[in-house]
Image (cartoon, rainbow, N blue to C red):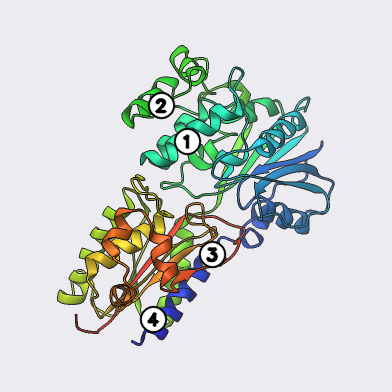
């Protein structure tokens, strides 16, 4: 298979994964019956604005509300106000949006319904520090977590216990109204408590759990943050709390759904597709090495699959930042994969974030071709040095191999596809 043919197939698969999680496809079928009282719409996440638009285009009754999304991810809505804020480190706009959303759900009654549109990214976008904490405190903690190598579940556990709105607190504020959560999952395992740090679901974790995570990764905390966790004043809303008795949660799009859509594209092209997992975690470079080993076993021995085939996976890897490069967990994975493959002639790949942003770059991910290493060396670029410097974006951009989608208006986490052809090593 020629490189341009492989790249075309991989890009179609990535696009199919994104399309499968578009709010216009998955929101309408999960809407509730019109309530006797009011329908209040709130939400947070990279897909929340697109979810709000899908709701407006389907809902014929009265509604009002506010949702907050990432800068650049707003879409026009007529009845639901769209606010933009920062991600992955919160800003004042996110705090103001969280205050408005919290105020909007005060004083509701049992006839009212609160429709919560939640997707990945909401942890940063819906930022309301607990009493005694400042936005600067939250920003310091977020930066420390992002550099630590902690998993998304661990990071969100800490965030829940420093928030006045996450960890079920927003749902409790809606009581006694009915709360219906429509969630697009961007987390391994699809646990609702980890999607946007669970503002509208019960949280079984504790301040002690959060403190253990901080100590595990050696993260330095501002004194006020340490006091919140050590005193237990940051405790969240627990399962069984009466204030959450009328909360219902529906997962309307997941990483598995996206991977299955991509697999369908491959099979239509006559290429067998194998989903290795939708919840793969760990250091991005380590996952890259493991995937390289699997791909070379397939290419060289026809085990556990015969060629041609594509190996699909999703989840959320982590990067422990040691260099000063331009990062991105998907490009870090891909660069490690390239180094481990050593220029294997029969293996191509793509890796990208389905929200269109890998790390803090407006770049979704990158391509890998059999000649990637050779082209880098010809330009005087040392792949191992780039990997050591956490400079995946710099590496692939220099080769013209970045994948840029722009805002996708959805988010079902990382997408990885490794195409193993019949070519010899």
Image height of 248 relative to 363, above or below: above
Contact check, label 4 and label 2, Cβ < 8 Å: no
Task: Answer few, some or many: residues within 10 Å of disc 4's Cα (few below 14, many 20 plus, some between 14 and 19).
Answer: some
Question: In the figure, is residue 329 to the left or right of 104?
Answer: left
Image height of 410 relative to 109, above or below: below
Give the residue at mark 4. Answer: 6
Question: Which tag, 3 or 4, sits closer to the chain's start?
Answer: 4
Single out the mark in the foreground, 3 or 4: 4
Residue shown at 47% from the left, 74% from the top: 11
Cα–Cα gap, marks 2 and 3? 37 Å
Give the residue at mark 1. Answer: 156
Single out the mark in the foreground, 1 or 2: 2
Cα–Cα gap, marks 1 and 2? 17 Å
Is residue 276 at least partly visible in the picture?
A: no
Element on which disc 2 rests: loop
Q: Is residue 238 or residue 163 the one in the foreground?
A: 163
Residue shown at 37% from the left, 47% from the top: 318
Q: Quadrant of the C terminus?
A: bottom left
Contact check, label 3 and label 4, Cβ < 8 Å: no
Q: Position of residue 82 (x, y in %)?
A: 74, 48
Give the residue at mark 3. Answer: 18
Question: Which tag, 1 or 3, sits closer to the chain's start?
Answer: 3
Image height of 216 relative to 293, above or below: above
Single out the mark in the foreground, 4 or 2: 2
Residue, far bottom: 2
Q: Is residue 60 or residue 197 the one in the foreground?
A: 197
Question: In the figure, is residue 65 to the left or right of 71?
Answer: right
Give the residue at mark 2. Answer: 220
């Amino acid at each position: 298979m020629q490189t341009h043919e492989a790249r075309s197939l991989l890009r179609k698969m990535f696009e199919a994964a994104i399309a499968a999680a578009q709010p216009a496809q998955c929101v309408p079928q999960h809407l509730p019956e019109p309530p006797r009282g009011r329908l209040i719409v709130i939400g947070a996440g990279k897909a929340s604005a697109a979810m709000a638009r899908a709701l407006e285009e389907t809902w014929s009754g009265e509604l009002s509300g506010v949702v907050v999304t990432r800068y650049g991810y707003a879409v026009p809505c007529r009845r639901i106000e769209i606010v933009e804020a920062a991600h992955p480190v919160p800003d004042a706009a996110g705090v103001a949006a969280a205050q408005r959303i919290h105020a909007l759900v005060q004083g509701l009654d049992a006839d009212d319904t609160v429709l919560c549109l939640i997707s990945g990214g909401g942890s940063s976008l819906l930022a309301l520090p607990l009493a005694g904490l400042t936005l600067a405190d939250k920003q310091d903690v977020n930066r420390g977590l992002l550099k630590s190598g902690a998993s998304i579940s661990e990071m969100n556990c800490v965030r829940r216990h420093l928030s006045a709105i996450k960890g079920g607190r927003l749902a409790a504020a809606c009581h006694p109204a009915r709360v219906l959560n429509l969630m697009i999952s961007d987390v391994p395992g699809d646990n609702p408590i980890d999607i946007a740090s669970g503002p509208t679901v019960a949280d079984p974790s504790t301040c002690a759990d959060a403190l253990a995570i901080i100590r595990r990764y050696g993260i330095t905390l501002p004194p006020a943050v340490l006091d919140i966790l050590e005193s237990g004043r940051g405790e969240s809303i627990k399962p069984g709390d009466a204030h959450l008795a009328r909360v219902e949660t529906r997962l309307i799009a997941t990483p598995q759904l996206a991977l299955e859509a991509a697999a369908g594209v491959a099979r239509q092209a006559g290429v067998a597709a194998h989903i290795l997992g939708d919840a793969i975690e760990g250091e991005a470079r380590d996952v890259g090495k493991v995937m390289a080993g699997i791909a070379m076993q397939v290419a060289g021995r026809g085990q556990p699959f015969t060629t041609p085939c594509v190996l699909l996976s999703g989840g959320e890897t982590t990067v422990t930042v040691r260099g000063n490069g331009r990062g991105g967990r998907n490009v870090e994975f891909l660069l490690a994969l390239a180094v481990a493959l050593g220029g294997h002639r029969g293996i191509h790949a793509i890796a990208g974030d389905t929200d269109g942003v890998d790390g803090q770059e407006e770049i979704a991910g990158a391509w890998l071709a059999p000649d990637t290493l050779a082209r880098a060396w010809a330009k005087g670029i040392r792949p191992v040095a780039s990997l050591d410097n956490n400079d995946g974006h710099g590496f692939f951009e220099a080769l013209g191999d970045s994948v840029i989608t722009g805002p996708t208006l959805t988010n079902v986490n990382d997408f990885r596809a490794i195409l193993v052809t019949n070519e010899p090593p």
